[in-house]
Amino acid sequence: MKRILWWAMSTLTLVVMLFSYHTSTEAVAAGGTNIAVPQTSSSTDTQAQASATTTSGSSGGDVTSGTASASSSSSSAGSSASKTYTGTSVDTRWGPVQVQITVANGKVTKSEAIVYPTENGRDVEINSVAVPTLNDEAVTAQSASIDMVSGATYTSNGYIESLQSALDQANL
C-alpha cells in the first residue's frame, strides 16, 4: 500500500511540475530564422550611424566592441528638430546590445537595436522576434519601463539598460 501511495504521489508531482513549466517556443517559431535586414532610414539616422561608425573606427574597434559615445545629429524638418541618441553598449551573456533612439519634440519617435547577438542560429531565431518587439515597446512606453520578451531575457535586460542610457542622454 505504501508503494502504491508513493508511486501515485510521485507521478502527481511530476505531472504538476511538467505542466507548470512554461516555454517560449511558440513566439520563436513564429519569427523564423531570418536576420533582420537593415531598413531604409532618414538622412538623420544615416548620419548618426555613420558618425557612430566613424567614431569607433578611429579607435581601431567597431561599434559592437566599445562603449558607445553619445552621437546625435539634427535635421531641420519644419519647426521641430529630430535628434538621435545612442545608448551605451551593454555586454550580455550572449553578446553586446546597443540601442539608438530618435527624439522629436521631447518624444521618442523611433527606437532601434543597432547591436544585438547574432553569432549563431539560435541568437538569430530569438532576436528576430525579440528586437522588433522591444523596439515597438520602447516607442509606445516612451520610457525604459517596458516588458521583457519571454525567451530573450538577456537581450531584453541589455536592451532596457542601453535604452535607459539613451533616454538619459536625451534628458527624457
Image: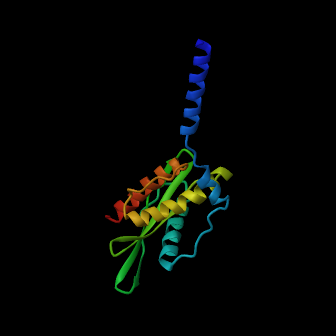
Given the current orientation, which residue lies at the most extreme bottom position? 78
Q: Which quadrant, please, contains the N terminus?
A: top right
Quadrant hosting residue 73? bottom left
* Up-down relation of residue 114 to residue 65 (above or below): below
Quadrant hosting residue 125? bottom right
Q: Which quadrant, please, contains the C terminus?
A: bottom left
| Residue 115 in sight here | no
Q: Is residue 171 left or right of residue 19?
A: left
| Nearest the eye: 4 or 129 | 4
Quadrant hosting residue 2? top right
What residue is shown at x 43% (from left), y 62% (from top)? 138
What residue is shown at x 65% (from left), y 55% (from top)? 29
What residue is shown at x 57% (from left), y 76% (from top)? 40
Q: How many marks?
A: 0
* Up-down relation of residue 5 to residue 47 (above or below): above
| Nearest the eye: 4 or 152 | 4
| Nearest the eye: 137 or 106 | 137
Q: Position of residue 105 (x, y in %)?
A: 33, 76
Q: Position of residue 112 (x, y in %)?
A: 50, 65
Q: Position of residue 68 (x, y in %)?
A: 46, 59
| Residue 33 in sight here | yes
Given the current orientation, which residue lies at the most extreme top position? 2
* Up-down relation of residue 124 to residue 142 (above or below): above
Q: Position of residue 116 (x, y in %)?
A: 56, 56
Q: Is residue 64 left or right of residue 144?
A: right
Q: Is residue 102 left or right of residue 132?
A: left
Q: How is the image coloured?
A: rainbow
What residue is shown at x 34% (from left), y 85% (from top)? 79
